Amino acid sequence: MFASTMGRVLLLTADPTITTSVGTGQPDDAGDGGPARATRLYRPSGVAVGSDGSIGSGDTRNLGCDGSPSQADLDTIGTLGARNHPWMDSTTMTTNFEPRTLDTKVPPFEPHPWLRNGHAQTIAGRYLPGPRVRLDATEHEIEADGGDRLVALESVPRSWRAGGPAAVLVHGLAGCARSPYVVRLAARLVRLGVRTVRMNLRGAGTGFGRARGTYHAGKTKDLRRVVEWLARRLPGASIALVGFSLGGNLVLKLAAEAATDPLEGLDSVLAANPPIDLAACSRQLRRPANRIYDRNFVRWLRADVARRHAAFPDLGPADLTQVSTLFDFDDLYVAPRHGFAGAADYYARSGAAPLISRIAVPGLVVHAEDDPFVPADPFRHADFPTGLALELIPSGGHLGYLSRTPWEGDRRWLDSRLAAWLASRWGSTPAVPASIS
């Protein structure tokens, strides 16, 4: 819930509850997610870095994003490893709030002095403690083509009213709706009165086993289906698309496509570290300094494919013994299964860079020049429309952005920047209550 007051908006702060949970009841207009179950966390035993910046465990559990039964009812939080680091702040987010104000003018990002390069920001952003989150959510299944089903988690502020704002959050490659960076932003948006849907891309997270197919960087059809599903349920709502890494490319591409194939309710688009030029990203990962990310990412993909083909034997064999890079995987697995001639064809037809000029809704793209996965040059050469702001930051890594100075009690600058942009965008929306009902 928020209302504009001279550059500031109403924010809801939390009580000290520290449990992370996911609701198991049915949705209603009051946003009650039903009874919640407490979660547990897994501390990674190895370092496996996905192309969305997520560092999963060596056994590929990836903090609940594998969709295994033992993880199916868990919600992740951004807290791993030791607590109370001297330079990190302990913040709790829950669904029980007291009002305060949020300054929408987030200061420019300045990296923490211990984390002054892209590798440090990327890894620390995934491993170091973040806010503790309690986020009640209701799971929905949405029909997709081929008999597959998509899975989304919806969180509704208690005082949300018809016509209020909504956001669809899209994770990155090897992530899911319970990836910490998705959960953290969703919690912030719910605190601001935004109805929030965290989408699992096809077969990801708890969508595993409900879809034979998979997603890729240009497959906007599934995202469009989720937005259309939400618009039907919430007539008159303003809907923002928010994507991280691969999800960022998807939301930008869909927003561009909406210029000629309109999407009801589409209000704005935000993307963090989106790989808008997939060929350039593939080359970036093959650089010597970044090969560790490439190798670990391929290791995760091999395990994921093996698990998927074991669950669906009719998919046939998948021989990935010759795959040693992400390019190999895209060339030998992704491309032939999605109708592309090869990796080069997949990259050329799926990146958002050539389409960005078509985007007609306002938005924000945030990227760091020292991102080890996504190079900065494509952003400099892309034709950004006047309504789509680009913030190209010298440092921040891939979805890292751990700042020198806390803002609103948190050093996770990216979370603050995205939430504040939407707060400023919707701050004067009459449908958003200015106080707790």
Image: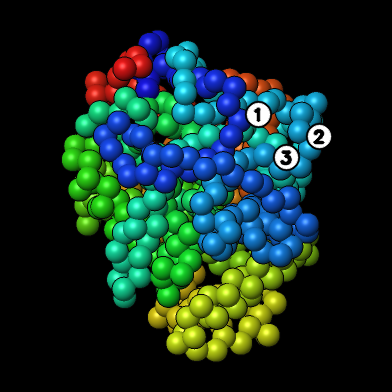
Q: Earlier in the sequence, mark 3 or mark 1?
A: 3
Residue 302: x and y, percent?
A: 63, 75
Q: Amino acid at mark 3?
A: Leu
* Relative depth, front residue between 129 and 320: 129
Q: Of helix, strand and loop, which one carries label 2?
A: loop
Q: Amino acid at mark 2?
A: Trp
- Which label sits on residue 411? 1
Pointer 1 local density, CA inside 10 Å: few below 14, some 14–19, many at least 20: many
Q: Earlier in the sequence, mark 3 or mark 2?
A: 2
Which residue lies under the disc numbered 2?
A: 114
Q: How is the image coloured?
A: rainbow
Residue 255 in the image: above or below residue 320: above
**Contact, CB < 8 Å: mark 3 with mark 2?**
no
Q: Amino acid at mark 1?
A: Arg
Q: Earlier in the sequence, mark 1 or mark 2?
A: 2
* Relative depth, front residue between 254 and 193: 193
Label 3 to label 1: alpha-carbon separation: 11 Å
Query: Nearer the viewer's eye, disc 1 or disc 2?
Result: 1
